[in-house]
Structures are given as structure tokens and as C-alpha cells.
Image (cartoon, rainbow, N blue to C red):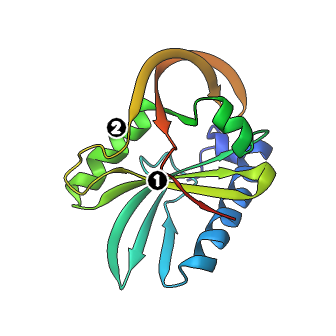
Amino acid sequence: MISSSLDINTPKGQKTLLDEKEAVKIFNSRFPDVKYIRTAKDRAAKVDAFLVENNELAAIVETKCRYNIDQNKLRSFNNEWLVTWDKIEQSRQIASSLCVRLVGWLYLVSDRTLLTIDIADADGLLTVPIRIEATKTQRTINGGSVIRNNAYISMDNAKVYS
């Protein structure tokens, strides 16, 4: 049964699905043999997608589409990607339980650029600088605000694809 309360079912949520597909196209233009298998979007899955290579699970993916920000603006924010810490921690635990790495995908929609970075290795050890702070941010893609622990992930060593 599809939950109508999920943000993905709103117009903004549906746009993110289309933009996620664009990010996958960019990735697959470079890595055609790697499959991006997304989780069901009609339920609140703990992870966004899986990367499969040679019929074997290679990574868990945390994917975010960001609007009104390009690489220059990202650099002006200390080149840090803001993601809810709980999402990173849950994804990291799932990835390590499956003995695969956790990868972050940040798709900058305005300049059609995909940044990818390894966040944790197969043992669950963080592989990138992450600053955690309780900050006030937008609650969901549809607005609102909330104070919560957020991860600020350094994108200094991200791979850039366009």
C-alpha cells in the first residue's frame, strides 16, 4: 500500500525522482556495467539504492538532489554536503552489515553535476571528514524546519561527473 504521507508523493518529491534518474544516467555514462538499483519509493526505506557490479553487491548509496546550488556555491559552504546524520548512520550500519561500502551521491541539479564520495568502508569506518552539529534545517523537501543532528560531509575529494 502506498503511503500518501511520504514526501516522495508530492510534486517536489516526484521531481527528485526524475532528477535522481538524471544522476544515474550521468553515472552510467561512465560506468555502464554498474547497476544502480533503487529501493522502493512508496515506503520509507532506510537506504536509497544499491550499486551492483558483476552481479555482486558493491555499495549502498545515499543519494541527494540539491537545487539552487552549483559547485561554486557548494565551495562557498566550505565544500560540505549537509545530510541528516541519522540517515548517514543508518545507511553506514546497513552497509557494514552487508560488508560493502557506503557511497554518497550529491547531484547538483542546476549544473547537472554528480559528485560521488565514499563515506564509509565495508567495515563501517568513516573514510571522509564529517562534522556533526545540531542545526536548524529544512524538515523535508516540502519545507518546514527542525533542529537535529546534521552531518556536514567534506566533498574536497569527491569525484565529479557531468
Residue 117 badge: 1
Near mark 1 (Cα within 10 A), the count class, few <14, some 14-19 or many ≥20, is: many
Q: Can residue 10 be seen in this view?
A: no
Give the numbered dot on residue 89. 2
Using the image, determine if residue 72 lies above or below residue 110: above
Residue type for callout 1 = Ile
Please tell me the numbered disc located at residue 71. Answer: none
Image location (x, y in percent) of residue 7: 65, 40
Say which quarter of the image contains residue 17: bottom right
Judge whether residue 82 can be spotted in this image: yes
Residue at (55, 83) in percent of width and height: 32
Q: Where is residue 87 in the image (x, y as percent from the top left)?
A: 43, 38
**Image side of residue 135 versus residue 7, left or right:** left
Report how many numbered discs are placed on residues in the image.
2
Work out which quarter of the rendered image holds the C terminus and state it: bottom right
Disc 2, SS: helix
How far apart are the alpha carbons under marks 1 and 2?
A: 16 Å
- Which x, y percent locates residue 69? 75, 39
In this view, the residue in front, 134 or 13, is 134
148 left or right of 101? right
Above/below status of 74 relative to 137: below
Q: Which of marks 1 and 2 is nearer the N terminus?
A: 2
